Amino acid sequence: MKVMKISWVDLCGYGDWLSSDAALKFANGKYTHVETRGEITKCELCYTDDGTPQVGFGELIA
């Protein structure tokens, strides 16, 4: 498990996806989870048709 610490500025407007910049950092760093406010959440990495990474939040881990 590799955890990336994030803050509210790393979230998209809907709050359940990382922003484009944060998603790129997540993909390049080979992270599997994010931590915010002391909570660790598993994330799903996928890519758009043009190869842009997108990161959606999964279930709460701790």
Image (cartoon, grey):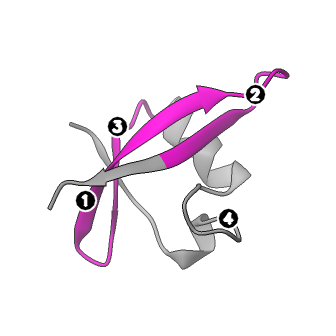
- Residue 52, position in %: x, y? 75, 31
Q: Which amino acid does label 2 sit on?
A: Thr
The answer to whether the residue labelled 3 contacts the one labelled 4, judged by CB atoms less than 8 Å apart, is no
What's drawn in magenta, residue-wise?
A: 29-56
- Residue 57, position in %: x, y? 45, 51
- Residue 17, position in %: x, y? 59, 55
Q: What residue type is labelled 1?
A: Ile
- Residue 4, position in %: x, y? 37, 52
Residue 48 circle label = 2
Q: Is residue 48 left or right of residue 17?
A: right
Residue 12 circle label = 4
Residue 4 circle label = none
The answer to whether the residue labelled 3 contacts the one labelled 2, judged by CB atoms less than 8 Å apart, is no
Label count reads 4
Question: Which is nearer the N-term, disc 2 or disc 4?
Answer: 4
* Mark 2 residue crowding within 10 angstroms, few (<14) / some (14–19) / many (20+): few
Disc 1 target residue: 40
Q: Main secondary structure of the magenta part?
A: strand
Q: Does the magenta stretch include residue 61?
A: no
What is the spatial separation of the Cα atoms under label 1 and label 4, in whole angstroms?
Answer: 18 Å
Q: Which amino acid does label 3 sit on?
A: Thr
Question: Which is nearer the N-term, disc 3 or disc 1?
Answer: 3
Q: In the rendered image, which quarter contains the N terminus?
A: top left
Residue at 38% across / 37% down in the picture?
31
Q: In this view, does 5 lie to the left or right of 62?
A: right
Q: Quadrant of residue 18?
A: bottom right
* Mark 4 residue crowding within 10 angstroms, few (<14) / some (14–19) / many (20+): few
What is the spatial separation of the Cα atoms under label 2 and label 1, in whole angstroms?
Answer: 25 Å
Disc 3 target residue: 32
